[in-house]
Amino acid sequence: MQPISRRNALLLGGIGAVGVLAGGAGLTWALTPGSSTVTGLEFVEPEPLRSVNGRLQVRLSAAERPVQIAGRQARALTYNGGLPGPTLFVRPGDRLNVTLDNGLRAATNLHVHGLHVSPQGNSDNVLLAIDPGTSFDYEYRLPDNHPPGVYWYHPHHHGSVADQLFGGLYGAIVVEDPDLIPISRERILVVSDISLDSSGRVPATSPMDRMVGREGNLVLVNGQLTPHLTARPAERERWRIVNACVSRYLRLRLDGQQLQLLGIDSGRFSSPQDVDEVLLAPGNRADLLVTTAPGTTVLRTLPVDRGTTAGMMGGGQASSTGADLVTLDVSGDPAASPGPIPAQPAPRDLRTATVTARRELTFAMGMGMGTGMMSFTIDGKSFDPARVDTTVRAGAIEEWTLTNTSPMDHPIHLHVWPMQIIEQGGRTVDAAVWQDVVNVPARDSVRVRIPFDDFTGKTVYHCHILDHEDEGMMGIIEAR
Ligand SMILES: [Cu+2]
């Protein structure tokens, strides 16, 4: 067992406090010898599954299973018995087949977040419900020019999305680069958060936490609490980081190491950007190069102010709390230089494109009529699966103004089609920046342009604070 460091003691204190809330048993548990929270284990990665000859066939079995989390016996929702689920490595032009077995006690389905694939039929169709005890065969055909990058999969069954992710259902997808970037090694870091009660189960979420957007007390990387990594100096590692948290924003720092950002989501910069910090709203991914320097350092997420809960019962700050994610020890003989990073293709740029339609979407929170509960709406309406909210012409280039009238930030996600950010914080963006989750700060707006290429059919846009999505902040879009 690891010696109990000051940080571990603090964590135990935190968990003890949860135990008190959950009842006396929790306190007993926290003080029981041998049950202390375990951190600092060797970093592990989800099982990699790679396409061969243009095909990847995967079976994902969703079920509640016993798992070890931070050295504790827990029961979590898992794909294939662990969390995260396996990492799917595919290439542009590939066909990905996923058989989803629903071993949960509730309906679920599967969303391949960020992939530019059809939303129809058995492709990325989040309007399907896969009943408990049944299976469904999904098939995704990636276009030959699909952008390389980091993507992910998770359930998207309206009303239980937050519960199913928080319980442990998520995994990474990597679309490989046609031209490889020379690196020492690549790592997948799926960041998630979870809360566990004294019996190792995920406790029910209070109505207030649903309104604010729940954040777990344990912030995990690949299902581990503060795992440990080693490297030699002068190595170039490629870290593919997924923010799989339900509501927690990540403001990542790795002090003392050189960070270069290749891109966010499917967006890739024309050359890597030197950065000190990377901000990932829920759902965002970072494709990051880390050039190692000797010493011990910690990948941390710092606190993020995401507005206030003004107007809600007991209104206060809505903040994502900070946490240590990974420790990195760099020592030994310096590695040989991995060689220069090849020039990246210039990203598509719609700043001078002809816009075929403009619209404004207004994201709001208000007191629901007669319920005393907060309502989460887009253009004044809560999600209705039977209503098409926005109809676009296939092939159109639209400009959307995303306006947030509420006192909290909302990270807005559009399925299938990425968004180019045109104006943010009142300023025109002077580069071609593409994301599929765009944060719209409290009482602010962001302007984006969207090319509705390649596919027709119905899909959704929504807030990626998944509690807000479940509470109704989602709309249906149809391209035809
Ligand atoms: Cu929201």
Image: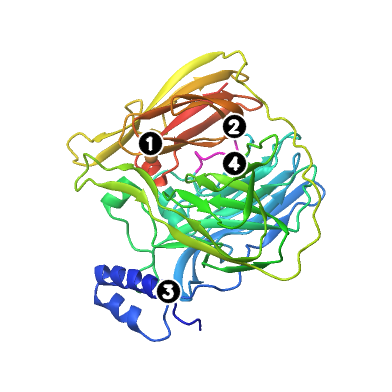
Indicate yes or no: mark 1 CB to ligand 1 under 8 Å.
Answer: yes
Residue at which label 1 appears? 473
- The local secondary structure at tag 3 comes to helix
Q: Determine whether, in the image, residue 205 is placed left or right of residue 121.
A: left
- For the point 66% across and 60% down, the residue is 293
Asked if residue 352 lies in the magenta stretch, the reply is no
Labels 1 and 4: the sequence-earlier one: 4
Q: Amino acid at mark 3?
A: Asn
Ligand 1 falls in quadrant: top left
C-beta proximity under 8 Å, tags 1 and 3: no
In the image, residue 33 lies at what x, y percent?
39, 86
Labels 1 and 2: the sequence-earlier one: 2
Residue at which label 2 appears? 433
Residue at which label 3 appears? 8
Q: Is residue 416 visible?
A: no
Foreground residue, 84 or 127? 84
Q: Amino acid at mark 4?
A: Ile
- For the point 48% across and 24% down, the residue is 427
C-beta proximity under 8 Å, tags 2 and 4: yes
Q: Magenta residues?
A: 121-128
Q: Nearer the viewer, mark 1 or mark 3?
A: 3
Labels 2 and 3: the sequence-earlier one: 3
Q: Amino acid at mark 2?
A: Val
Indicate yes or no: mark 2 CB to ligand 1 under 8 Å.
Answer: no
Q: What whole-number distance in Å separates the C-alpha atoms at marks 1 and 4?
A: 24 Å
Q: What whole-number distance in Å separates the C-alpha atoms at marks 1 and 3?
A: 38 Å
